[in-house]
């Protein structure tokens, strides 16, 4: 199996603020619920600019993580517009590749 490489080169961290909840991969390779403690813009923190605290764990486990270890809708590639999030309420017929449902019919009287 080929080594896993990060597809996220330049990432916009501007939406990540202190207190933002997300999922972060711990050193054991499992994603846990975490909260952003701070976001650094320093060059020495370029690879891992987000400090997270894993919820339910002591501050000793806080760590700096990069985009390859973060799952969050607030994190997006640099230059991608902050478009409107997809709504889960859109109709099936409006989704590409889907056929519209047949209209409901009333029972016929005999």
Image (tube, rainbow, N blue to C red):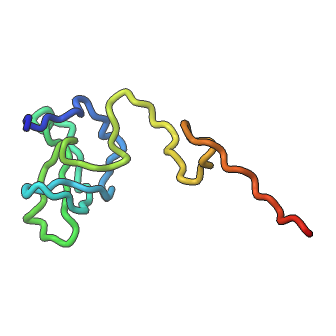
Residue 88 is situated, as x and y percent measured from the top left of the image, at 53, 53
Q: Residue at x 18, y 51 (%)?
A: 51
Q: In the rendered view, tell whether residue 86 sits above or below residue 105.
A: above
Pick the front one: 68 or 94: 94
Q: Quadrant of residue 6?
A: top left
Q: Residue at x 45, y 36 (%)?
A: 82
Q: In the rendered view, tell whether residue 48 sits above or below residue 107.
A: above
Drawn side of residue 18 relative to residue 42, left or right: right
Residue 64 is situated, as x and y percent measured from the top left of the image, at 13, 49
Q: In the rendered view, tell whether residue 5 sits above or below residue 24.
A: above
> In which quadrant of the rendered image does the N terminus lie?
top left
Pick the front one: 85 or 57: 85
Q: Quadrant of residue 43?
A: top left
Residue farthest toward the front in the current orientation of the protein: 110
Q: Residue at x 26, y 59 (%)?
A: 35
Q: Residue at x 19, y 61 (%)?
A: 53
Residue farthest toward the top in the current orientation of the protein: 79
Drawn side of residue 79 relative to residue 97, left or right: left
Residue 18 is situated, as x and y percent measured from the top left of the image, at 30, 54
Residue 40 is situated, as x and y percent measured from the top left of the image, at 20, 42
> In which quadrant of the rendered image does the C terminus lie?
bottom right
Q: How many marks?
A: 0
């Amino acid at each position: 199996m080929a080594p896993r490489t990060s597809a996220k080169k330049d990432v916009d961290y501007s939406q990540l603020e202190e207190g933002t909840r997300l999922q972060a991969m711990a050193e054991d390779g499992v994603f846990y619920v975490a909260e952003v403690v701070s976001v650094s813009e320093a060059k020495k923190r370029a690879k891992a600019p987000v400090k997270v605290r894993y919820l339910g764990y002591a501050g000793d486990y806080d760590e700096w993580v990069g985009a390859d270890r973060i799952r969050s809708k607030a994190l997006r590639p640099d230059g991608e517009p902050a478009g409107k999030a997809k709504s889960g309420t859109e109709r099936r017929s409006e989704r590409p590749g889907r056929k519209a449902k047949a209209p409901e019919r009333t029972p016929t009287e005999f």
